[in-house]
Image (tube, grey):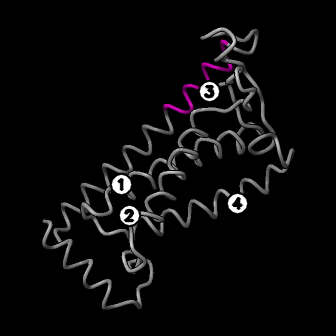
């Protein structure tokens, strides 16, 4: 496989990751600055921007378990880096690589808040269904995790993940051959 091609895809992934985290952090800074005083209805009775300092997880569960979330998120990110490094740079896995970047960006965005502030800044509220208040990082995590689930369930076959097991030589060789063919 062409190493320069692989390097450029990794740089693109890292650049996208940084950009996505930046978008999340800037949105939280703006929410804190402008929404702390009063919420803003974007669509009255449907969608509101409302600032909230969340010291728990989704739906406010596990309140004040900051270190638990920091350790869990760090372990998750280590797993994502391992997977990212091992995913072959071929068209078949492009969606998986993109989703790994998205889910990692969301995890990093909320990890930054937990580490620096002790809480996560949330600000998007669907009033119509009284859905818990969330943020951009939560969108990254939720949407990408859902799409990963769909891909793993319906698109990829079990042998497609042989790249995760370095000892699974034959199947991994087939994937590497496909990568060379796609170059």
Q: Secondary structure at mark 2?
A: helix
Packing grade of label 1 (10 A; few <14, some 14-19, many >=20) is some
Q: Label 4, label 2: how many angstroms apart (C-alpha)?
A: 28 Å
Q: Secondary structure at mark 3?
A: helix
Residue 31 image position (x, y, % from top left): 64, 20
Residue 78 image position (x, y, % from top left): 56, 65
Disc ID at residue 155: 2
What residue is disc 1 on? Answer: 95
Q: In the rendered structure, which disc, 3 or 2, sits on the residue that comes first in sequence?
A: 3
Q: Label 3, label 2: how many angstroms apart (C-alpha)?
A: 35 Å
Q: Nearer the viewer, mark 3 or mark 1?
A: 1
Splitting the image into 4 quarters, where does residue 42 fall? Answer: top right
Q: Look at the image and say whether residue 27 sits in the magenta stretch.
A: yes
Disc ID at residue 28: 3
Point out the image quarter for the C terminus.
bottom left
Q: In the rendered structure, which disc, 2 or 1, sits on the residue that comes first in sequence?
A: 1
Disc ID at residue 67: none
At x 49%, y 34%, the residue is: 22
What residue is disc 4 on? Answer: 72
Q: Label 3, label 1: how many angstroms apart (C-alpha)?
A: 27 Å
């Amino acid at each position: 496989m062409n190493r320069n091609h692989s390097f450029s895809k990794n740089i693109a992934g890292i650049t996208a990751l940084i950009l996505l985290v930046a978008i999340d952090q800037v949105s939280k800074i703006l929410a804190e600055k402008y929404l702390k005083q009063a919420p803003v209805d974007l669509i009255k009775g449907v969608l509101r921007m409302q600032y909230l300092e969340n010291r728990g997880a989704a739906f406010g569960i596990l309140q004040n378990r900051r270190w638990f979330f920091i350790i869990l998120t760090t372990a998750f990110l280590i797993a994502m880096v391992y997977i990212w490094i091992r995913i072959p740079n071929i068209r078949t896995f492009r969606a998986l690589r993109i989703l790994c970047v998205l889910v990692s960006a969301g995890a990093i965005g909320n990890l930054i808040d937990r580490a620096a502030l002790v809480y996560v800044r949330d600000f998007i509220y669907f009033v119509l269904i009284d859905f818990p208040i969330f943020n951009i990082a939560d969108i990254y995590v939720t949407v990408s995790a859902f799409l990963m689930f769909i891909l793993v369930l319906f698109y990829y076959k079990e042998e497609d993940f042989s790249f995760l097991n370095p000892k699974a030589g034959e199947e991994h060789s087939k994937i590497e051959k496909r990568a060379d063919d796609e170059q």
